[in-house]
Amino acid sequence: MNRVPVRRRHVVLVATVTAALSYAASPADSVRAAASTAVDVLHYDATVTPDPAARTVVGAVRIRFQALAVLDEITLDRGALEVDSAAVDGVAVAVTPAARRAVVRFQPAVPAGAIRELDLTYHGTPGAGLQFPADRAQVYTIFTTSDWMPSVDRPDDRATLRLRVELPAAWTAAGVGRAGAVTTAGDGRRRHEWQLDQAAPTYTFGFAAAPFTAVTSGRLRFLGEGFSGDELRRIFAETEGMLRFFEDRAGVPFPHATYTQALVARTVGQEMSGLSLLSDAYGRAVLADPTAISLAAHEAAHQWWGNLVTCESWSHFWLNEGMATFMAAAYLETRQGRPAYDRAVSRFRAEYARVRDAGGDKALVFPDWNRPSADDRTLVYQKGALALHELRVLLGDERFWPALRAYTRGAAGRSVTTPDFQRAIEQATGRDLSAFFDRWVYGR
Ligand SMILES: [Zn+2]
């Protein structure tokens, strides 16, 4: 995202403004409310207290943002949370709820380029973004950060994070970024704290907590409940090798000091900044068959393709998911030989053929990703991975891998579109790939 020049922080001269918290959303608000594009969030500083018994959360977040245009309001994603108070640079401001969003109005307007701090307090029953599994003493986040912290959930808005989470005293926790001290928070809780210094999209924010067994191995940390330390080491025996392989293929070192993998009750796999969640079922499957590691490789690949190089909007989601799916197959190739890679590609091809033969084929760049079907997901993941395999075949390994490195290095820390990807590969190889992209990416 382009940023306007940073100006000195504006001093708010208005002494008092009465908060006008109205929850009578008008239809106009619902129509107008859309994730703000004229704002760049720089930093979130949050304290979150989940209540596992009640399956609720209360929290406070300070959002430091820069206005990219004159702003008389911004719209935040909030899921089902209710905002209890809002203030800008210490002065109360009005908040109006809209569908899954909250509109914060500024008076006077925030000038273009100005940086402000918006303080919110909130509470509520989170949606799927904060999981309290029914039969377990656990809490963990899945993808949608605005379900537990009001935020701008667009994948092209990268911000740093300081997160404190208050949890039952007996629980072990993992979060994104550097772990700070664990302190006593009262009511039998302890406060865990993390600081994420590399700006990242909010979907990579989060934490997981439970009475975990924890194992540390070099830069790696493995967490699981109901698994022994020895079992966790076996389940994640390949993790260091995965990180080294992806570092080599990306041409970019792993961007965090530590990498934590946690097994939780239920997830299809979730990538956060320096933290991945996999399910207990995944752990048991690897104990039964140590070669069944594709999913952990997929999530580890996201540390580069997804978290570090992010699709600019969900329309280009295949750049995250097709890439991670393809890279997991490439990792299997190095560890288990070419037949393992070929089997993975055959599965991509068969899954794609099933959707295509049923008339469900679409371009990999979607008009939107608001209500994707299972077939749409198959296209983004498996057709996307197959397209990357076909690109590898077209270019040959001696051109494909250096081009992928050039793309990844050039886009590290940024959000990108499919044309950005095409341009990077064309520049690195000196080839016009428009026919390839027309067939595999834009065509159907
Ligand atoms: Zn993925």
Image (tube, helix red, strand yellow):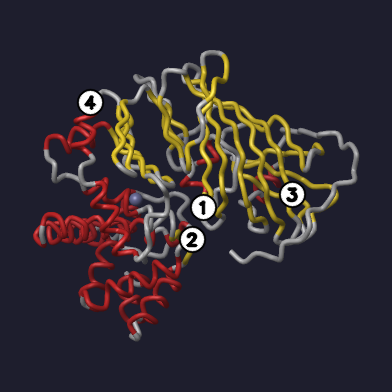
Whether residues under marks 3 and 1 lie with C-beta atoms below 8 angstroms apart, the answer is no
Q: Nearer the viewer, mark 1 or mark 2?
A: 1
Say few, some or many: other residues with alpha carbon within 10 Å of mark 2 (under 14 / 14 to 19 / 20 or more). Answer: some
Please, what is the three-letter code of the amino acid marked with disc 3?
Answer: Arg
Please, what is the three-letter code of the amino acid marked with disc 1?
Answer: Gln
| CA gap, disc 2 and disc 4 | 36 Å
Say few, some or many: other residues with alpha carbon within 10 Å of mark 3 (under 14 / 14 to 19 / 20 or more). Answer: many
Mark 4 vs 3, N-terminal side: 3
The residue drawn where x is 82% and y is 39% is: 91
The residue drawn where x is 19% and y is 32% is: 284
Please, what is the three-letter code of the amino acid marked with disc 2?
Answer: Gly
Q: Residue 116 has which mark?
A: 3
Secondary element at tag 3: strand
**x and y, in percent, of residue 65 in the image:** 68, 51
| CA gap, disc 2 and disc 3 | 23 Å
Whether residues under marks 1 and 2 lie with C-beta atoms below 8 angstroms apart, the answer is yes
The residue drawn where x is 78% and y is 53% is: 9
Say which residue label 1 marks. 198
* Relative height, residue 368 to residue 433 (above, below): above
